[in-house]
Amino acid sequence: MCVALIAALTVSACSLLNRSTPTATLKAFYEASKKKDATAMKKTLSKGSLDMFEKQAKEQGKSFDDLLKSDQHTPDKMPETRNEKIDGETATLEVKNDQTNKWDTLPFVKEDGEWKIAFDKFIEDMMKGLGEPKIK
């Protein structure tokens, strides 16, 4: 999957320091994406997402940081979000995809006391919806 798709799903501008909610985590990712700050982006990603991007970087012959900083389009205008739902150590947030004008459900997991974006689960769920086999 392309980092551009993932960046297109990110939202809003907020402090990189406050990630006490899934919405705030997504905002921090958005801000880091705008600045092409790979270190800050990584701090918002789940362990599963980090593993997935590391594998993708190796397949493309890029460094992990270069993968995160390249091939992405961060929207000028922040997509809307709605319906943040927290269920224990997992959460979801609906993010409006301006390209399709539909709402995508982005999953989060709580790791080390902080909410992290679970892009690996997002892509896995998307593949299931397309009838594709699970990503390993």
Image (cartoon, rainbow, N blue to C red):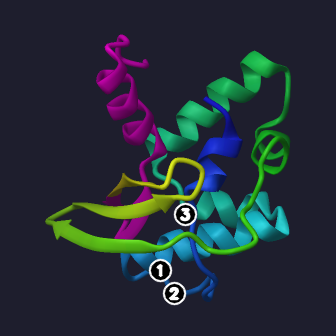
- The type of residue carrying mark 3 is Thr
Q: Is residue 32 visible?
A: yes
Q: CA distance from mark 3 to mark 1?
A: 10 Å
- The type of residue carrying mark 2 is Asn
Name the residue at 34% across, 64% down.
Answer: 93
Residue beneath disc 3: 44
- The type of residue carrying mark 1 is Ala
Asked if labels 2 and 1 touch by Cβ distance under 8 angstroms, the answer is yes
Q: Is residue 84 left or right of residue 47?
A: left
Residue 59 location (% of width, % of height): 73, 16
Magenta-colored stretch includes residue 130: yes
- Residue 77, compared with residue 10, is above or below; it is below
Q: Quadrant of residue 123?
A: top left
Packing grade of label 2 (10 A; few <14, some 14-19, many >=20) is few
Disc ID at residue 18? 2
Disc ID at residue 24? 1
Which residues make up the magenta segment? 109-136
In terms of sequence position, does the residue under pointer 3 or pointer 2 come before the other?
2
- Residue 5, compared with residue 81, is above or below; it is above
